[in-house]
């Protein structure tokens, strides 16, 4: 299996790059943001509860997102691997993910952290807000709060994976293709360069 954490602040381009990466490496994309927005669209109890946090740019409680990931891992038992996007966002989530993957004997291989400067993040999020209709992308105060929450609660997750020797910093500035090439480079160094994601050559 190939299990990747795609990491970075809001607006770093995780979703865009994940779409390209799952195609190339044949992985399953698990985005907690997408799952939560799906719950919200379905007006489920979980979705309506999560909305309170999402609208303010705060994190949804750990136990909620950990439970969601557990369900998705079970639903995709035969997968060749996963790209975790927007998860883990706290050290508690990172520990819980390690425990869940321990049961599968398939640990996280690496954390790819996209580095993007703050003014560019704000630009990208405001741009996305105009087309996506996402409420949390349309209010500068909510955007600022999400970036602050990232710096305060999520950035420490870097150290969690660094201690395990799994942290890889990737320059997230430039064109989508340039950034994709950098990510593939980092993955192929560990994955043997096969491109198929199963580790064969
Ligand atoms: P972005 O990375 O652009 O902020 P996401 O789609 O990843 O967008 O997340 C949107 C919102 O969903 C977050 O601001 C947060 O409220 C909630 N969320 C997503 N993933 C998590 C998570 N792992 N833990 C807690 N809250 C989350």
Image: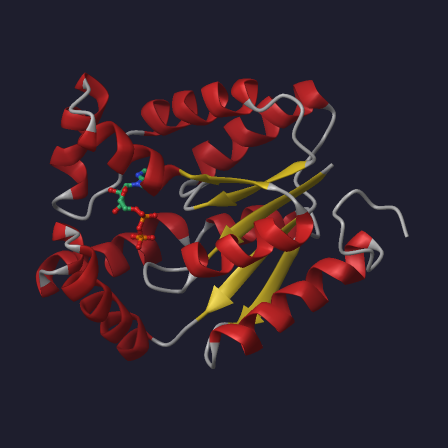
Name the residue: 82% across, 56% down.
194
Name the residue: 50% across, 60% down.
17
Q: Is residue 172 above or below residue 160?
A: below
Outermost residue on the bottom side: it is 174
Which quadrant does ligand 1 occupy? Answer: top left
In this view, the residue in front, 84 or 111, is 84
Residue 142 in the image: state x and y as whole percent. Answer: 13, 56
In this view, the residue in front, 93 or 13, is 13
Q: Is residue 21 above or below residue 174?
A: above
The image's colour scheme reads secondary structure
Q: Is residue 118 above or below residue 162?
A: below
Residue 78 in the image: state x and y as whole percent. Answer: 67, 24
Name the residue: 59% across, 55% down.
21
Residue 49 in the image: state x and y as whole percent. Answer: 16, 25
Task: Give the number of callouts.
Answer: 0
Name the residue: 54% across, 24% down.
73
Quarter residue 131 falls in: bottom left
Q: Is residue 60 visible?
A: no
Q: Is residue 124 visible?
A: yes
Q: Is residue 144 rendered to the left or right of residue 83?
A: left
Q: Is residue 169 rendered to the left or right of residue 198?
A: left
Q: Is residue 162 above or below residue 90?
A: below
Residue 178 in the image: state x and y as whole percent. Answer: 56, 78
Quarter residue 68 falls in: top left
Q: Is residue 140 rendered to the left or right of residue 176?
A: left
In this view, the residue in front, 28 or 149, is 28
Screen quadrant of the N terminus: top right
């Amino acid at each position: 299996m190939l299990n990747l954490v795609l990491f970075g602040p809001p607006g770093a381009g995780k979703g865009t790059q994940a779409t390209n990466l799952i195609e190339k490496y044949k992985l399953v994309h698990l985005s907690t943001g997408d799952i939560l927005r799906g719950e919200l669209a379905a007006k489920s109890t979980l979705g309506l509860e999560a909305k309170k946090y999402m609208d303010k740019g705060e994190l949804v409680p750990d136990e909620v997102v950990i439970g969601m990931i557990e369900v998705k891992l079970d639903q995709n038992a035969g997968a060749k691997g996963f790209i975790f996007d927007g998860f883990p966002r706290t050290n508690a989530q990172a520990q819980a993910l390690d425990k869940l993957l321990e049961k599968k004997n398939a640990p996280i291989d690496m954390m790819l952290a996209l580095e993007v400067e703050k003014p560019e993040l704000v630009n990208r999020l405001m741009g996305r807000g105009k087309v996506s209709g996402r409420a949390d992308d349309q209010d500068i105060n909510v955007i600022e709060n999400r970036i602050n929450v990232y710096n305060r609660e999520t950035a420490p997750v870097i150290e969690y994976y660094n201690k395990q020797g799994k942290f890889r910093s990737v320059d997230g500035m430039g064109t989508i293709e340039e950034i994709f090439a950098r990510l593939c480079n980092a993955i192929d160094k560990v994955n043997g360069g096969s491109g198929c994601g199963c580790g064969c050559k």
